[in-house]
Amino acid sequence: MQITKFTDLGLRVLMYLTQEVNPSTVTINEIAKQFDVPRNHLIKVVSRLNKLNWVIATRGRAGGLKLGVLPSELKLGNVLRELENKTSLINCAEPLCVLSGQCNLKEILDHGLNSFYEEMNKYSLQSIVDHKTQQAVIKLHQRYVG
């Protein structure tokens, strides 16, 4: 299974927001520049993260983004499940499979997907940003010039 660019960027935004190097909040422009991604795509990702209450977005001149949850409380499997929005790997109904209802493939793949999410829930956002990742994110923050 390969995650979408949307999910990949969502994870990177969450990781970036774990390190508060500067007292001011982080802007969408900063993240877009740091990760070399289109601002419009990033707005969609941040909007979703905000709706999930994982990111707090404040509008206005002094506005910006900050993490809305503790990194240790945000489980990776839950993030992947929400951002991927994938509960099944195959759809036997469209197009209608001639084996539909007579095959175990969908059930087995669904079990595997759920097992994947459960395994990923053994890790939190904090697990991702410990040690070398933390240092790399801090360096990104420090090199940003608005």
Image (tube, rainbow, N blue to C red):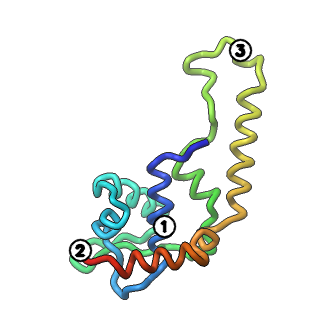
In which quadrant of the rendered view does residue 71 lie?
Answer: bottom right
Q: Position of residue 13 (x, y in %)?
A: 44, 65
What is the CA distance from the residue labelled 2 to the residue labelled 1?
21 Å
Farthest residue, direction top: 98
- The crowding category of the residue bearing disc 1, from other C-alpha atoms within 10 Å (few below 14, some 14 to 19, many at least 20), is many
Q: Secondary structure at mark 2?
A: loop
Q: In the rendered image of this protein, does residue 120 appear above or below residue 74?
A: above
Q: Position of residue 114 (x, y in %)?
A: 71, 46
The reply to whether the C-beta atoms of the residues labelled 3 and 2 are less than 8 Å apart is: no
What residue would you read off at disc 1? 14
Q: Secondary structure at mark 3?
A: loop
**Tag on residue 99?**
3
Name the foreground residue: 141 vs 84.
Answer: 141
Q: For the image shown, how many numbered marks are present on the structure?
A: 3
What residue would you read off at disc 2? 60
Mark closer to the chain start, 2 or 1: 1
Q: Is residue 92 left or right of residue 8?
A: right
Q: Amino acid at mark 1?
A: Leu
Q: Position of residue 146 (x, y in %)?
A: 24, 76
The reply to whether the C-beta atoms of the residues labelled 3 and 1 are less than 8 Å apart is: no
**Tag on residue 110?**
none
